[in-house]
Amino acid sequence: MAQISASQPKPITRARINVLLLCSTLLAVLVLQQLIQIQVRRELRGRRLDELAQRELTRHEVLQPRRGTIYDRDGVALAMNVNRPSLYVDSSKVREPAKLALLLAPLIGRDAGELQPILMDKTREWTRLARWVSDDAARQIEQLQQDKELGAGLWLIPEAQRVYPRGEFAARVVGAANYEGVGIAGVEAFYDSEIRGVTGTLRAERSGSLDQQPIWIAPQQIIEPQDGIDLKLTIDSTVQKIVEDELRASVEYQQAEGGTIIVMDPATGEILGMAAWPPFDPNRYTQYPPEVVNRNNALTDVYEPGSTFKVLLTAIGLQVGAFTTETRVNDTGVVHRYGWDIGNWNRVGNGAITPGEMLYHSSNVGALLFGEMIGRERFYDYVKLLGYGQPTGIDLGGEGTGIVRWPEELGDQWSDLYLDQNSFGQGIAVTPIQHITAIAAVANGGTLMWPHVVREKCQGEQCTPVQPRVIRRVFDQAVTDAVRQMLVRNSENYGAFFWYTNGNAYFDQPLVPGYRVAAKTGTSQISLGAAGYDNNAVIGSVVGFAPAEQPRIAVLVKIDRPKKAAYGIEAAIPVYQHIVSKLMTHFRIPPDPHYVAEGQTIGGP
C-alpha cells in the first residue's frame, strides 16, 4: 500500500472557502460603493458648477407693463406715459471717476463730490445716477459715451415717466402717480391696480458681453406683462375749464381761502366738472405739501350747508305729508327754543309764510317751524336716505362722511334743539359731493344716483362702459316738481340782486336770461367745535340746476371765507350765474327769447 508523504498539502476546507468568498464580496461592495460615491460627487459637483455658470449667464428680467392712459370723456389724454432716458453707470468699468463726476454733475443736478465715491466704487455694477434726464443733458451724455476713456460704463436707459400734459387741469380728479408708478391720489390711486397692469418676467441666457443681451436662440421662459387698462372719465373738458376759471377768478377777487365747484349730470350721476382750491400740478407733486396732493376738498371738506339745506327740508316735508305747498307758519323773526333765541339773518319776521316763501326769504324761523312739523323720526330717516352721514361711494379715494347727530346714537343726550338747528342747515356738516348728490335727486325727479368720474374702461380696443347706478328713490315726482317751481322763483330773486349789481333794476328777473333755472344760496357759519362759531368769517354757497325742467346740470358753488362778501348771495351767485350761462350755450340748449327782463340780453352780461 502506498504511503502518504508528510510534505503533501492539506485540502482547503469549505469553511475557509466561505470566509474567502465573503471577504471578496465585501471588498467588491466597498469598491463599488466608492465608485458610486465618486460618480455621485462628480455629478453633484458638475451640477453645482453648472448652476453657478447658469447664474452667471441666466437673468430673470422683470417686464414692466404699460400704465393705462387717462382720457376725458372726448378722448383727450389727461395722464399718459412718455419714455425718457435715465442715466445708469457700471462703476467697475469707469476709468476716470474724478473727471467724470465733474462732467456729469451739472448735467444731472447732483454734486460732483457726491458722485465721485459712487463712480470709484468698483463693487457697484449697476447704479442709477439720474432719472429722466433732460433732452439736452441726454445729448451731452451721448457725446461722452463716444469717448472710450470717459464714457466707459455709462448707460442711457429709456424709462416710462408718468406725465400730465395739461398740468393743473382736472388734477383733483385725475390725481397723481409717484415716481415708482404707483397712484397716490385721485383716479390714479383709486384705480391703481387696474391702471398699473401686471408685471411679466423673462428668463433667458445672456451673452458675456458688456451689453448682457439675451441669447435669443437659447431656451427662454416668458410670462408676458399685462398692460394696465385705459380710463375714459366723465369729465367734460369744456365744463372743467369753465369751473376752474370761475373758481380762480372768484377766489382771487374775494381774497378767499379756498373753494369748491362741482357740476354733475343729475340724470346719470356723472361728474362733468370738479374744481377745488388750491390747485396743484401732478407733474411736480413733490413740490407740494402731502395734504394738498392727497386731499380733494370736494370729498373731504365738511361744512354746515346753511340755507341751501332748506331745499331738502321742503322736499322731505312735502314727501311725508307734514305740510303742503299752501301750509303757512308764522315767522316772527325770532323764536325761543330750549333756552336759546333762534332768529332770521336780520332778526326780522316775514309773517305767515308758505314753504316757497320760506325759501324765497331764506327764513330760519320758517324752516325751524316746518322742521318741527316733520318731526324727529321722519326728518332723520330722510336725512339718511339722502346719503348724509355716510360716504357716497364715488370712485375717488379719501371721501369723508360728514357729521350728523343721529337721535338713536345720542340717546338721552339728544335734544330737539338739534332738529331745529338742522332744519335750516346748522349743526349738521356735509361734504360738497354729498350735498350735490342730494340736490341732484331733487333735480332728476327724486332718484339718488351714484356719483362717479369714470365713464369707460378700455383694454386695447375693447371698452366697457360704466353704467349709471340708482342708489334709491327718495322723492316722488310731484314733490320735486313743486320744489322746482319754488327754486325758479327763488332764482329770480337772486336775478334782481345780480343784475342790480350790474346797474339794472331791483325787481325779480331771470338769473340767466332766456333760461328758467333753480337756485338756493346759503351763508354758513364756520364751526370752531367746542369754541362755538367763528364770528369773523363765513362760507358762501349756492346749489341749483338748469334748465329747471329736464335739467342738464346740477351745480354746487362753495367759496370759503370770502373777505369782500358778507353773504352767500354776494360770493356765490355771480359764479353760479356765469357757469350756468356758459354751460347752456355749451350744451346747445335753446333759450326762451321771451324769458328776458328789460335791460337783459341772452348770453349776458
Image (tube, grey):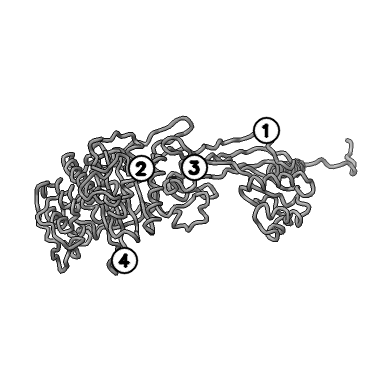
Q: How much space separates mark 2 and mark 4, taking CA atoms? A: 33 Å
| Tag 2 residue | 271
Q: Of 577 and 387, which appears nearest the observer? A: 577
Q: Are marks 2 and 3 in contact (CB under 8 Å)?
A: no
Q: How much space separates mark 1 and mark 2, taking CA atoms? A: 50 Å
Q: Earlier in the sequence, mark 4 or mark 3?
A: 3
Q: Of 582 and 232, which appears nearest the observer? A: 582
Q: Amino acid at mark 2?
A: Ile
Q: Earlier in the sequence, mark 1 or mark 2?
A: 1
Q: Secondary structure at mark 2?
A: strand
Q: Earlier in the sequence, mark 2 or mark 4?
A: 2
Q: Residues within 10 Å of mark 4 (few under 14, many from 20)?
A: few
Give x and y (percent) for residue 323.
10, 49
Give x and y (percent) for residue 237.
42, 40
Give x and y (percent) for residue 532.
27, 67
| Tag 3 residue | 79
Q: Are marks 1 and 2 in contact (CB under 8 Å)?
A: no
| Tag 1 residue | 216
224 shown above or below 261: above
| Tag 4 residue | 536
- Residue at 89 percent across and 44 percent down: it is 6
Q: Residues within 10 Å of mark 1 (few under 14, many from 20)?
A: few
Number of residue marks: 4
Q: Residue furthest top?
A: 461
Q: How much space separates mark 4 and mark 3, taking CA atoms? A: 41 Å
